[in-house]
Amino acid sequence: MPEYIGQFFLDLYKSDPSWNFIFFYDPSQLERVLDGFWMTLELSIICVILSVVIGVVGAWMQTHKNPFLRIVVQGYIQFFRNTPPLIQLMFFYFALGQFTPSYSPDGWLEVPIISNVGWAIISLSFFAGSFNVEIFRAGIEAVPESTKEAAEALGISHFQSYRYIILPLAFRVSLPALNNNLVNLVKTTTQAMAIAVPELLYQMVSIYNDYSTSMNASMVLLFVVYILLVGILVFGVHKWEKNFKIPGYGG
């Protein structure tokens, strides 16, 4: 951080103590903000990727001839769509976390093999994935039956038909709804604070708990960062949607 920027915000704090952007002139507080930002970015990217993978696999299982697979997927969807993500997060960490094995790196302290960050990734990915399954299922149903029948007539297996023909077309149809769900997922990562994941909201709350005069500044920075993060995601998916567009598919 350039010295003149730090001096500007320090002078601002001295002239108006209710606007204490301490992280712009105190290196230790800036480090906390950056650590929180990178954790938020890591959570968002990993959860987005995993939720899309879950959605693709789940949609394939829903179209499978095996009724057991369809029942399993439907049960998963109902469980994760009908319970609050915060409750799921706490259930995974506090309930299931008690049954996970642990290891002792120093011979004394017992450390669970899945950390709070790991549980946040698992919980949030499954939560968003349950919506993605339905999004991709709707996209698959939008693919004309004649296309599916043509694939079967050529002797292509169910998996090959799904991978090479149906999914690419369904993906294009699903992109607008997928975009909305991924935006919600990025915003939902803030709930990881409930299990002490040191993401950006956790760090900002910690800062203004230590320095009460920095509450306004912390919330402003938090607001701006999330607008930028979500804006980048929306722009990227919209660009992707535009490049993938095929006349007659996806509007």
Image (cartoon, rainbow, N blue to C red):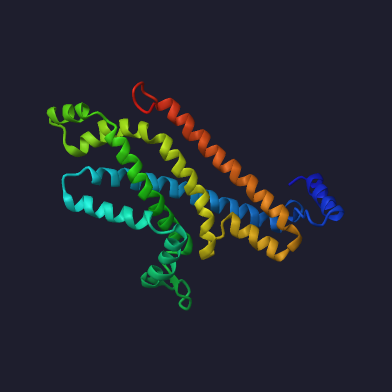
- Left or right, 9 with reference to 241: right
**Which residue: 40% across, 57% down?**
122
Q: Position of residue 118 (x, y in %)?
A: 44, 59
In this rendering, the answer to whether 149 lies above or below 188 is: above
**Which residue: 30% across, 41% down?**
137
- Left or right, 242 with reference to 168: right
**Which residue: 21% across, 27% down?**
147
Count of all numbered marks drawn on residues in the image: 0
* Relative depth, front residue between 86 and 98: 86
* Relative depth, front residue between 244 and 113: 244
* Relative depth, front residue between 13 and 134: 134
Q: Position of residue 121 (x, y in %)?
A: 44, 56
Residue 96 location, quadrant: bottom left
Q: Quadrant for the C terminus, please.
A: top left
Q: Name the residue furthest bottom.
A: 108
Residue 210 location, quadrant: bottom right
Q: Name the residue furthest top.
A: 247
**Which residue: 41% across, 40% down?**
178
